[in-house]
Image (cartoon, grey):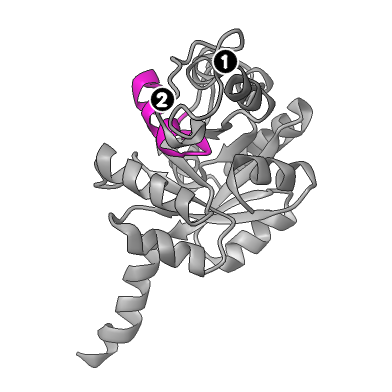
Amino acid sequence: MHGRAGLRRALAAGETLRGTFLKLAGEEPVDLVRAAGADFVVVDLEHSQLSEEQARRAVSRAAAIGLPALVRIPAVDSGLINRLLEAGAVGIQLSTLRSAAETRALIEATRYSPDGARSISLAHPGANYSGVPLADYLAAEREAPPLLVGQIETATTIDPLPDVVSGLDVAFLGVTDLAVSVGLGATDAIAARVAEVRAAAADAGVVAGSWAVSPTAAGDAAANGDRYVVVGSDLQFLAASLRLNLGETR
């Protein structure tokens, strides 16, 4: 699977895709995710110590080895989004999405006119560094625009959920933040909110997705209809392996 077109085809075909969050700098973590057989990776600019430059380098490496890379950001920043997309990101994952206005802002920042307000340049690899005619580049971008993933992770939203997720490719359950927002002990209320988000995604014709702490949890998510599943993170897996292999030696 290569690039956003492949990711889109797989989601449209009803496939369940698995990826992970990338929080560590360098090419090796990207290579390891690819070697493990992940369908995609999400470079994390919300909960990591990665700089923008390190994130762009990770995205470029992923593009070079055929691993679709999205980038998670905490808020819509049109300049940052443009730089990440020009570096080779196949999409943007926006955290803590609560309003239809935020969704519209994300669409505006990732689409060229007349569908949005993204600034145009051909001086990047996606346009073969100006080797692709402008009209051809714009046509290709309009046919397969960047993927948009919105994280729903609060007990309430400003606008009705179907309005918030409309226009996204994936409505993503940020299960940890959602549980904290609803109340950690409120098991039934958490389950009801999760079901509400999944139902809103289905009503809007949007793929449902979620984060899973383990492969077992990822299987449960897929069984519940989530087809874009982010399993753990490179940092989480490294920590678990270190505890397993070193913790028992003391």
Which residue lies under the disc numbered 1?
100
Choose mark 1 or mark 2, whichever is in front: 2
Query: Residue pushed farthest left?
Result: 250
Q: Which residues are magenta?
A: 73-96
Which residue lies under the disc numbered 2?
82
The reply to whether residue 182 is in sight is yes
Quadrant in the picture for the N terminus: bottom right
User: Relative to 149, is 219 above or below?
Assistant: below
Q: Amino acid at mark 1?
A: Ala
Q: Earlier in the sequence, mark 1 or mark 2?
A: 2
For disc 2, the neighbor class at 10 Å (few under 14, some 14 to 19, many from 20) is some
Query: Residue pushed farthest top?
Result: 114
Quadrant in the picture for the C terminus: bottom left
Q: Magenta segment: does it hold 153? A: no
Q: Which quarter of the figure has residue 241?
A: bottom left
Q: Amino acid at mark 2?
A: Asn
Element under disc 2 = helix
Residue drawn at the location 76% of the way across and 34% of the way down: 202
Q: Which quarter of the figure has residue 38?
A: bottom right
- How far apart in space, not on screen, are marks 1 and 2 (Cα)? 21 Å
